[in-house]
Amino acid sequence: MKDVTQLTEGWSVRHEEALLPARVPGCVHTDLLAADVIPDPFIGLNETEVAWVGRRGWTYLTDLAHDSAHERTDLVFDGLDTAARITLAGRELGRTRNMHRSYRFDVTGRTGPLEVRFASAYEEAEAVRSLAGSRPNVYPEPSQYIRKMACSFGWDWGPTLVTAGIWRPVRLEHWSTARLARVRPLVTVADGAGRVEVRLEVERTRRGEGRPLTARASVGGVQAEVSFEGEEAVLELEVADPELWWPRGYGRQPLYDLEVRLSDESGPLDGWQRRIGFRRIELDRSADEHGTGFTLVVNGVRIFARGVNWIPDDVFPSRITPERYRARLRQAADANVDLVRIWGGGIYEDDAFYDACDELGLMVWQDFLFACSAYPEEQPLRGEIEAEARDNVVRLMPHPSLVLWNGNNENLWGFRDWGWEGELAGDSWGEGYYLGLLPRLVAELDPTRPYTAGSPWSGSWDHHPNDPAHGTFHSWEVWNRQDYAEYRTSVPRFVAEFGWQAPPAIATLRRALPGERPAPDSPGMLHHQKAEDGNGKLNRGVARHFALPDDDFDRWHYLTQVVQARAVAAGIEHWRSHWPVCAGTVVWQLNDCWPVTSWSAVDGDGRLKPLHHELRRVYADRLLTVQPGDGGLTLAVVNQSAGVWRTSVSLRRLHADGSTVHEDVVDVTAGPRSVVRLPVPPVLAPAEGSAKEFLVADADGLRALHFPVPDKDFASPRPRYDVAVEPVPGESDRVDIVVSAHTLVRDLLLQADRLGPRAAADQGLQTLLPGERTRIKVSGCGFPDVQDVRAALFSVDTM
């Protein structure tokens, strides 16, 4: 049987004349940080102090010693970042130029000093550019000339920290006769049966050539066996009436162990094991009276996708542990998310990511790794890209959570709208990858899943790539230039990106900017704001609704977080109310890779922004929303659950002081996975432009509000409320904060981290009517003083 030896210990990295301890998996930045050679690049302005690291070559060293009775020993690297020359005892084993591939070298009988010499990623990229010629890029860095995590070179939410190192595990594999080189399980469901077609390829030693081999596979109590003498074999298994895997909110996520064993007459040689799930995935792109659809269909059920975009959770990905993946994805699930899109400027994530998604019922939309750039299609990139795609399609296809392959992020759109066509002057730019190579590879290797050429993409060049009526749509004009109310002016078929910025939590800022008195334009705040005119857009977004604070950072911080949450909620509520024409929203973005002002719902230290709590509300199975339009107000009752929702909606037209002007009750029945839209009776609708009246809709603990004018124009009373701190019996580290309103209190928010860096609250923004109260559960802060709690509470017009 094959033996495996992990090579995690005994590595060094050469820095000038010294050898520093190195962690494998890891990267040069984390090794230099551990050795106190560089400061933490996430703190203050330190990012600029360590820029030199990415422009140097780095060498990793260890002594390779092994002794095995097997015929063959392979040195296997799961990930090398990026352009490397590997030598053993002074002799070259090979060269690499792709972070996203694995590599295997025959080292049978060879020992001695092992060196992995990484060239600067800048040097490698410039060498490729000199061969292929220049191509346009949204950012000035040369990310499209090297197969490396593009956001290492910086993005509008990320630092420029260009890494190098052995970023994924390395090991020795000792084997004889034959090994399993590739296993592809094609999992389908038809006529009530689950079918697994296991396609395997083997590699043989010289003595193993032509020797009869036996492959056995088992899943769900069913077994299959085949004997063969070549390099390929197919096993077919059928499981009667398997329990289906469903996205969260639609059913359970049963997983089945699929095992493959390879043997010969002498006994077992190799093994492979993964968990699979039985489900059918379709993508309905049918044309209709509204344009061209883009609807995911799982096990025959049409789904409104409640999604978030995912970026690498750390600019140094080797630091992301399985526990961290699970915590972050648990945060997504807690926000009622059911789809995570892995964005094309990052990485193909570790299997631990997809394992967690399998278990949590989070569908995965996987981009191939192309983003916001024109990519040469010539060598040496073309061969690397094909090998990378083959590696990762085969590695990831067992995961039932993976539902869609996507060719690129924004490059088809960029070619049409960003001036690329003229600049390219006929040069290749990636179209051949997205419309040729990649769909061919997916059809060959993983025909069980749909492929789309890009995001956004209308389905063909017959329509503009970012036409909201066709396929996927990215909505960025609203954030860049408009008020978030503009989200309501169209109904795209599938919104794959949209979002609004806000700064991270106060405790995150305090850690990242020690000693700095924060202000929107303080040095550290500006350095941790990477978007073009980011603060200008934040300020304009606030000023449309509130008086922009002159010199009050706490109020500015609160208001920017309020506007972020409101903006994203406005888009989702509008688009969900138009299901099934609109079939999904994917918020930009769930997470951050460092402490930064960004579009995220979870900041770089893992703290929840108010947006996260708002996502939990607007992505819930049941949603109540009031939508303004040219014909007046519409009450939308959204039911994404599998059952009928029968409810009575209380509609109240209230005065700013909370007194009732008019009220009524509407009985509504919303069928499963449906939306009911009803006009609000004119007698209940506040007059357009009214500064003194608003509408409240309540049903089954859900609430929707409509104010006819921006907050700054509404006659809100000065908020008054009482605060009490109550212990929770038996829990020393949890308290309840009870807020009782005497007036209208709009967007009440407890910033729990002001009570302590570990403190967290279970509630986000809440609007209270006079006489109402809320109970906020807080952990991680002991028993705080009431005055400290008051100082951590914010609401509209409180300061």
Image (spheres, helix red, strand yellow):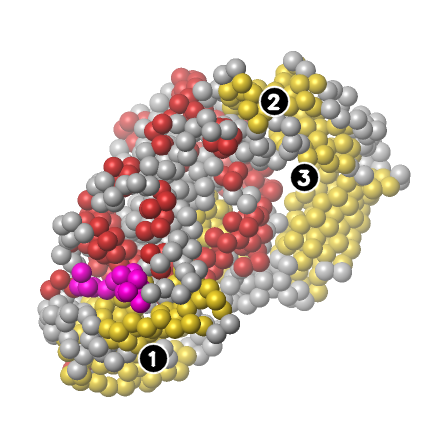
- Sequence-wise first label, 1 or 3: 3
Q: Do the residues labelled 1 and 3 touch (CB within 8 Å)?
A: no
Labelled pair 1, 2 in contact (Cβ < 8 Å): no
| First reached walking from the N terminus: tag 3 or tag 2 | 2
x, y (%) of residue 257? 69, 55
Q: What distance separates the C-alpha of mark 1 from that of mark 2?
A: 65 Å
Amino acid type, mark 2: Leu
Range shown magenta:
786-799
Q: Count all numbered tags in the image, as a single digit.
A: 3
Q: Residue 52 — which label?
A: none
**Residue 182 marker:** 3
**What is the three-letter code of the residue carrying label 1?**
Ala
Circle 3 crowding by C-alpha within 10 Å: few under 14, some 14–19, many from 20: some
The reply to whether residue 291 is in sight is no
Q: Distance between the residues labelled 3 and 2?
A: 30 Å
Which quadrant of the figure has residue 261?
top right
Give SS at disc 1: strand
Instruction: Tell me the residue at 70%/53% (across/down).
Output: 258
Say what amino acid the circle numbered 3 marks. Arg
Seen from the viewer's position, the closer of residues 592 and 268 is 592
Q: Is mark 2 on a helix, strand or loop?
A: strand
Residue occupied by mark 1: 699
Q: Nearer the viewer, mark 3 or mark 2?
A: 2
Q: Is residue 416 above or below residue 144?
A: below
Q: Please give the label number shown on residue 61.
A: 2
742 horizontally vs 147: left or right: left
- For numbered disc 3, what is the local secondary structure? strand
Q: Does the magenta stretch include residue 796?
A: yes
User: Which of the image's four quarters has the C terminus?
Assistant: bottom left
In this view, 631 is above or below 495: below
